[in-house]
Amino acid sequence: MSKNIPEKVSNRLTLYHSIMVEYIEDGIDTISSPQIAQRLGIDDSQVRKDFKLLNNPGKCRVGYLVKDLKDSIEKTLGFAHAKDAFIVGSGHLGLALAKYDSFNSYGLNILALFDNDPQKVDLQVNNKQIFHISKLPNLAQRLGVDIAILTVPRKNAQQVADFLINSNIKYIWNFTPAVLKVPPTVKVWNENLMGSFLQFACKDIIGD
Amino acid sequence: MSKNIPEKVSNRLTLYHSIMVEYIEDGIDTISSPQIAQRLGIDDSQVRKDFKLLNNPGKCRVGYLVKDLKDSIEKTLGFAHAKDAFIVGSGHLGLALAKYDSFNSYGLNILALFDNDPQKVDLQVNNKQIFHISKLPNLAQRLGVDIAILTVPRKNAQQVADFLINSNIKYIWNFTPAVLKVPPTVKVWNENLMGSFLQFACKDIIGD
DNA sequence: TATAAATTGTGAAGTAATTCACTATTCTGC
DNA sequence: GCAGAATAGTGAATTACTTCACAATTTATA
């Protein structure tokens, strides 16, 4: 599946997916591209072009089948492939993410948390144990985990990232504001919460 | 300032900003576009084009002054304009965000939290009080707050959003997976954590 | 001082993304 | 069954974004 879906498209697919979930809850079977487009403030032909990538044809004058759309979006985005991950950094954000059960239904299993604070080690969060960071390399290898969710303070981010890379972690979902230096074999996804907000704020609040 | 900076550009500006913070900590005064470009895996002329929007000329053979760049990015993204906001929904994520002090240094003040659970009302989180959601309209008006950070469960999201809109909230930073229906006068920024991850996961982990 | 190397700034070229405009199809109501 | 309306699908046009290529400048060095 998922053959080179551009980032913008996959971002829209996740929004479409949310709408499908809502329509299913409301017991609505079909949905049209203008309905979706209006909801998201985009062009309806854009929606149709995106859906074309899903190989999920609609019916003229009717629209698309909600259930089928949801399934093919999930297939394309890989919900079915369960992926295991560690949360590295058991501060407020790390703990909140550990408690965020939606991850699971989207195909992401948090297996454990890590921290360097001895006070936190061995605590349980949402049925997941917090381990000392020194245990990570061994556990990563034994469990075959190569995804880490990084939620340490900014000033430790690079150092911890280096440690993760040495532990054969290949994917880092970076919730810190640091821009990580990594070798080409390691992929980083920057969540950058404040950056995200600033875009929002900049556009309309500061405005002019 | 901030005259129609495209979203892609402002996203890059936040990444540049992080790098500037790091360089300042490391005591480095100047930085060149190839240095930044290599760090982010983008083209160096892209960096220069972005900086041109900042009205912050560099010097040939030397590069840009780190301090000046940081300042003009902050000016352009509006860090200086303090903005007040409420967190609506005092679950794990809401509490984690309330404790996330970086918001402050980026110009966002969380004044209070809200929830409908009587057990949570009147608790203090990071020196911010949790109020019952029914108090929101009055407080929003008295304090002149029109930004809400929405962290309620998905199934309540639309209903709470409607309530916020009736309380004259104009900007909703939406951390729920719901796609909110709002009038054109209200702006929504979807954080969409899982969507964000799926883009990351889809691209490289699922592969093909 | 002359030469070489590094860097900015930028117009032009090239890509990618979005919107437009239209055709073909299907459904609804008369 | 027919007329009208809504919709999918899609090539073309447009717009936005990125990369290329290179002149102009500055610094370091011999």
Image (tube, coloured by chain):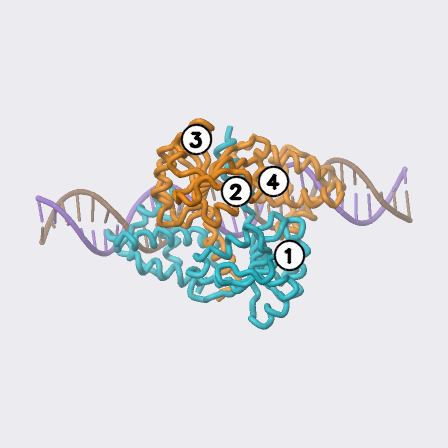
Chain colours: A cyan, B orange, C purple, D brown
Identify the amino acid type marked 3: Leu
Identify the amino acid type marked 2: Val
Dot 4 falls on which chain? B
Q: Is residue A171 visible?
A: no
Q: CA distance from mark 3 to mark 1?
A: 39 Å
In the picture as drawn, the residue positioned furthest to the bottom comes out as A142
Q: CA distance from mark 2 to mark 4?
A: 39 Å
Which numbered mark, 2 or 3, is in the foreground of this view?
2
Which residue lies under the disc numbered 4? B50
Q: Quadrant of residue B26?
A: top right
Q: Quadrant of residue A142?
A: bottom right
Placement of the N terminus of chain B among the 4 image quadrants: top right
Which residue lies under the disc numbered 2? B125
Are both tags, 4 and 1, on one chain? no
Dot 3 falls on which chain? B
Secondary structure at numbered mark 2: strand
Q: Residues within 10 Å of mark 4 (few under 14, many from 20)?
A: some
Q: CA distance from mark 3 to mark 4?
A: 40 Å
Res A117 label? 1
Residue at image x 35%, y 39%?
B162
